[in-house]
Amino acid sequence: MWRNSLKLLVNSIKTQEKYVPPLALQGFSKHIHRSSPLAMFVQTQETPNPNSLKFLPGVKVLESGQTMDFPTGQSAFCSPLGKLLFRIEGVKGVFLGPDFITVTKSDDDVEWKLIKPEIFATIMDFFASGLPVLQEGVPNSDTQVNEDDSEIVQMIKELLDTRIRPTVQEDGGDLLFMGYDDGVVKLKMQGSCSSCPSSIVTLKNGVQNMLQFYIPEVVAVEQVDEPSDKVSEKEFKQFEMKLKQLEKE
């Protein structure tokens, strides 16, 4: 009986038809979340940031080399997926990669075991809906070399794209080139890297050392934040304080 059941299951997968298991097997699948006749399995991967978790849906999220960072719910206005994830209580940031989604929770008090099931369900239901990941906005692409870039800047961008950014994306984040001035390379960290306790160590011991090894003109690497990021962080903290006051009342 078991062999016949497994054979039916294999044949149904090959023909992409909905498979109705026999009574002996129905109890084993009642806790599996299925968004389509063929189950979608979302895997998770830890990042160096304990408050960030990488979700791999097994399908394309953005084009190869592209990323998109949503540090606040307001910034996710252009992404139906981002807006849905921010509706989950405890989600502070969402970062989209070519084949992954990094979710950052607000603080240590929010437990992953409580919000992971809702994140799983949201991701699976979204990709089953057929909606676009982005409706507006232009994702960050590979660092493009401009005609007016100096030779040093061209070398920096090439190293970032070929050696550094792929490694950082493996950890659920990204690095954006923000400028080069008097030997100082300015980078913006996104995703799991933006609030990671070891981000400064990564910049100094990893990125800076590699750039200096190949490009002697590089003196230092600095992390920079855009003014809008600081405002958003301030607004988020104020919102958190209001919620805590309401809970006490």
Image (cartoon, grey):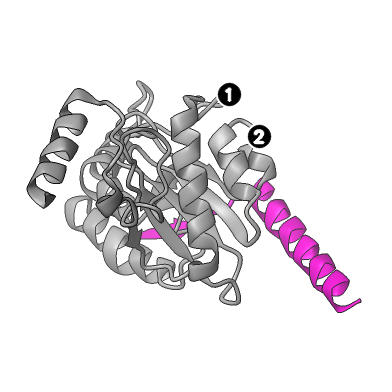
The amino acid at mark 2 is Phe
Quarter the C terminus occupies:
bottom right
Residue 107 shown left or right of residue 205 in the figure: right
Q: Can you give x and y, in whole percent of width and height, for residue 196 in the image?
A: 46, 67
Q: Can you give x and y, in whole percent of width and height, for residue 11 in the image?
A: 14, 31
- Can you name the residue that lies furthest to the right here? 249
Judge by depth and name the residue closer to the eye, 224 or 9.
9
- Can you name the residue that lies furthest to the left here? 3
**Quarter of the rendering containing residue 5:** top left
Q: Is residue 246 above or below residue 124?
A: below
The amino acid at mark 1 is Glu
**Majority secondary structure of the magenta segment?**
helix
Residue 230 shown left or right of residue 85 in the figure: right
- Can you name the residue that lies furthest to the top here? 147
Judge by depth and name the residue closer to the eye, 22 or 93.
22
Could you tell me how far apart the alpha carbons at marks 2 and 1 are, in whole angstroms? 8 Å
Report if residue 90 lies within the magenta region.
no
Q: Secondary structure at mark 1?
A: loop
Residue 31 shown left or right of residue 58 in the figure: right
Pointers 2 and 1 in contact (C-beta within 8 Å): yes
Residue drawn at x 54%, y 72% as measured from the top left: 111
**Quarter of the rendering containing residue 248:** bottom right
The part of the chain drawn in magenta is 220-249
Q: Secondary structure at mark 2?
A: loop
**Quarter of the rendering containing residue 64:** top left
**Circle 1 is placed at which residue position?**
136
Could you tell me if residue 237 is visible in this image?
A: yes
Judge by depth and name the residue closer to the eye, 225 or 41.
41
**Circle 2 is placed at which residue position?**
77
Residue drawn at x 49%, y 58% as measured from the top left: 117
